[in-house]
Image (cartoon, rainbow, N blue to C red):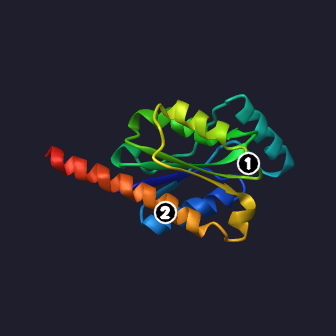
């Protein structure tokens, strides 16, 4: 089994990282589609408010079953210091299916510690790796080495899980 990359992106920054990660480790990816309108200045404000209130949302149909993957890399933008509502919804609905998790985020500032703690608590498991990237680094293509290191941790975990599974046979 391989890792699965799952991400939500309001502006395209987290999508850029999620797609680059999936390409790097040659695995499946899933973009979460929020049915709630979040574009423009009002969407920005609504998004921050929803994150601060730990609100869930309605997601569009999903393609991949996370139970079929060794590790699910969960990517989200940082909203008010927290994960996005679409990511909160995905984790809430699928946490019992996760064999392993890793977290990545894109952000304007440096406010990711609470986000990763919140994701870990909601998943009920520790991540194999975490990656926080400032949006400016993503925009300027200055994140490739950090993404390779994160991808390496995912691949190592996936390989270890695959070895354990074959030994159990």
Compared to residue 120, the image places residue 107 above or below, namely below
Which disc number belongs to residue 29?
Answer: none
Q: Secondary structure at mark 1?
A: loop
* Rendering coords of residue 98 (x, y %): 41, 40
Residue that numbered label 2 is attached to: 22
| Vertical side of 53 occupied by 127: above or below | below
Comparing marks 2 and 1, which lies closer to the viewer? 1
Tell me the SS state at disc 2. helix
Image position, residue 159 (x, y; %): 31, 56
Counting other residues with Cα less than 10 Å from the Cα at mark 2, is it few (<14), some (14-19), or many (20 or more)?
some
* Circle 1 crowding by C-alpha within 10 Å: few under 14, some 14–19, many from 20: few
Classify residue 159 as left or right of residue 93: left
Give percent across and percent down for residue 55.
Answer: 67, 30
Residue at the (85%, 44%) spot, across then down = 42
- What residue would you read off at disc 1? 110
Q: Residue at x 57, y 45 (%)?
A: 60
The furthest residue to the right: 41
Q: CA distance from mark 2 to mark 1?
A: 24 Å
**In the foreground, 30 or 54:** 54
Q: Residue at x 46, y 44 (%)?
A: 101
Q: How many numbered discs sit on the rendered protein? A: 2
């Amino acid at each position: 089994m391989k890792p699965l990359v799952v991400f939500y992106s309001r502006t395209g920054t987290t999508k850029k990282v999620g797609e680059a990660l999936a390409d790097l480790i040659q695995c499946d990816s899933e973009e979460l589609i929020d049915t709630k309108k979040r574009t423009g200045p009002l969407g920005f404000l609504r998004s921050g408010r929803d994150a601060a209130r730990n609100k869930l949302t309605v997601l569009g149909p999903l393609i991949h079953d996370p139970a079929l993957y060794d590790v699910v890399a969960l990517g989200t933008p940082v909203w008010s210091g927290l994960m996005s509502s679409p990511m909160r919804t995905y984790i809430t609905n699928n946490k019992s299916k996760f064999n392993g998790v890793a977290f990545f985020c894109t952000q304007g500032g440096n406010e990711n510690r609470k986000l990763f703690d919140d994701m870990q608590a909601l998943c009920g498991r520790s991540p194999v790796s975490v990656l926080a990237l400032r949006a400016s680094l993503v925009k300027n293509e200055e994140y490739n080495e950090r993404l390779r290191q994160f991808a390496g941790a995912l691949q190592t975990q996936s390989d270890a899980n695959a070895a354990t599974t074959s030994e159990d046979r």
